[in-house]
Image (cartoon, rainbow, N blue to C red):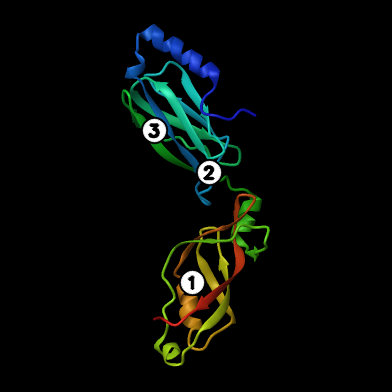
Amino acid sequence: MRRGVITRSVIGFCFGALLTSGALAEDLGGLSGTVIDARTQAPIPEAIVIAKSPALAGEQNGVTNEKGSFELTLLPPGIYGLSIQHKGYQVFAPEGLNVKPNRTVKVRLQLIPEETAESRLLAENPIEYTDKMKAPALVSGPNVEYTQQAIDRDVEGVISVRCVVNVAGIVHDCRVLKGLPFMNRAVTDTLERRKYKAATLQGKPLAVWYTFNIRLALPK
């Protein structure tokens, strides 16, 4: 399967069109960027990127590489629209990209997975996390704050909390499996205020029951 930025046939076509119009290489611009999964933020390889513009004779195509990157070159200046396509995702068609001479417009494009009966089931019904999955990853949120009662009693150790992390990265329904005195509520409240990247299996986001093992040490 072909990988890369742009097919040779498209390059040849563009050169012919540009020579006919009298355009010079230094008058041309480009489009480049990355295509990622809107839910997992993972790069999407082999996505088809199509550029169209009144300034362009026909259209120019590219394919994202293994890092989700693409580059379309030799574009006459003008206002462009893109069409990004990949099996299993909704088509995304941003407009109004202004390509200027000797400039490359850089974009970051997010594709939304198509909903299927299976994906809806996995999104709505959490399953047990296993080592075959990629674990949820913290995006943002507070650190655990010690309660005064725990500080006064020198409470330290590991607390284990089982929670649902859904496909949107929201944590809920937390249950303490192994607690620490005066710290259980502080830890569960903190977890439910955090945002995570969802767990994935073969690149697909899942709602999972996930156990957080958090080591607590007294503040210095």
Image coordinates of residue 96 in percent, x first then y, are 35, 32
State which tag comes first along the sequence, 3 or 1.
3
Element type at mark 3: loop
Q: CA distance from mark 2 to mark 1?
A: 27 Å
Res 95 label: 3
Give neighbour class at mark 2: few <14, some 14-19, many 20+ (Cα, 10 Å): many
In contact (CB < 8 Å): disc 2 and disc 3: no
Residue placed at 41% from the left, 81% from the top? 219
Locate the N terminus and report the quarter of the image it occupies: top right
- Pick out the residue farthest to the front: 220
Q: Which residue is under mark 1? A: 191
Please name whichever residue, 54 or 13, is drawn nearer the observer in this view of the structure: 13
Please name whichever residue, 7 or 110, is drawn nearer the observer in this view of the structure: 7
On the image, which quarter does residue 98 sit in? top left
- Pick out the residue farthest to the bottom: 153
On the image, which quarter does residue 16 sit in? top left
Amino acid identity at mark 1? Leu
